[in-house]
Amino acid sequence: MANRTRRSAGLGAAALAAGLVAGMTGVGDGRAEEPPRAKPVRPGPAPEASPARGGAKDGARTACERELARLGARFERIDPVIGEGGCGVSRPYNVRQIAHGVSLAPDTILTCEAALATARWVRDAVVPAARAMGGGARLSAITHATTYDCRGRNNQPDAKLSEHAKGTAIDISGFGFVGHEPIAVMARAGRGTIEEAFQRAVRAAACLHFTTVIGPGADAFHDDHLHLDLARRSRGYRLCQ
């Protein structure tokens, strides 16, 4: 009787073990147990364009205009310029006065950023340089040859698009003064005059405000003006010639 009881207990334990193994490995029904399937996620509607980007642009534009006005510039918003092949200015400005008592002519088509860079350069470099010439000289006018122009660099047909085509460049051709004769931008190297000193000073200082400065002596394309632009290059590289 005791032997029969021990045999029954052994068979029961074996069956229990077999059942546990079958439950763990799926041997009992001939299939491996599959993990629970995740419920499919249905894609929702595409997110709408956030107004934050447009708001940021508007905020930057307002801040730029406020700073221009603080520096004494007089300007107006003009209609967007739409060109071909990447040309155009979405938010252009006509700046008639670049600093207190300093006119800018003829009319411009510039981005606010380019106008602001010009105004800061005039305040920090051109106005002090004019005063340093002595004789009571005071800057009263700046003339330019070009702002917006849909073309390649240096007017070459196969060249990369010029910054002029984006409204981020200005070609300064001359300066007018009270108490001094006008100074036209030209090759002056070696003349040793106060006009040469003035031109050298404002040209060198321009590279603190613009990323490209090219003028007389750099090449034949820039013998009669200072080309100033805001081209973006890797690692913040600035081209000063």
Image: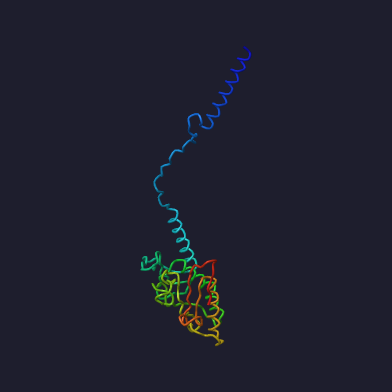
172 versus 77 height, above or below: below
Residue 64 x, y percent position in the rendering:
47, 63
169 versus 49 height, above or below: below
On screen, residue 224 versus residue 15, left or right, reads: left
Residue 158 x, y percent position in the rendering:
41, 75
Looking at the picture, the colour scheme in use is: rainbow
Q: Nearer the viewer, residue 77 or 163?
A: 163
Residue 107 occupies which quadrant of the picture?
Answer: bottom left
Quick one: which residue is furthest to the top in this view? 1
**Quadrant (top left, top right, bottom left, bottom right) of the N terminus:** top right
Quick one: which residue is furthest to the right in this view? 2
Residue 3 x, y percent position in the rendering:
63, 15
Q: How many marks?
A: 0
The structure residue drawn at horizontal position 44% and vertical position 55%, both measured from the top left corner, is 53
Q: Nearer the viewer, residue 178 or 187?
A: 187
The structure residue drawn at horizontal position 46% and vertical position 37%, both measured from the top left corner, is 37
Residue 178 x, y percent position in the rendering:
49, 80
Q: Nearer the viewer, residue 120 or 47?
A: 47
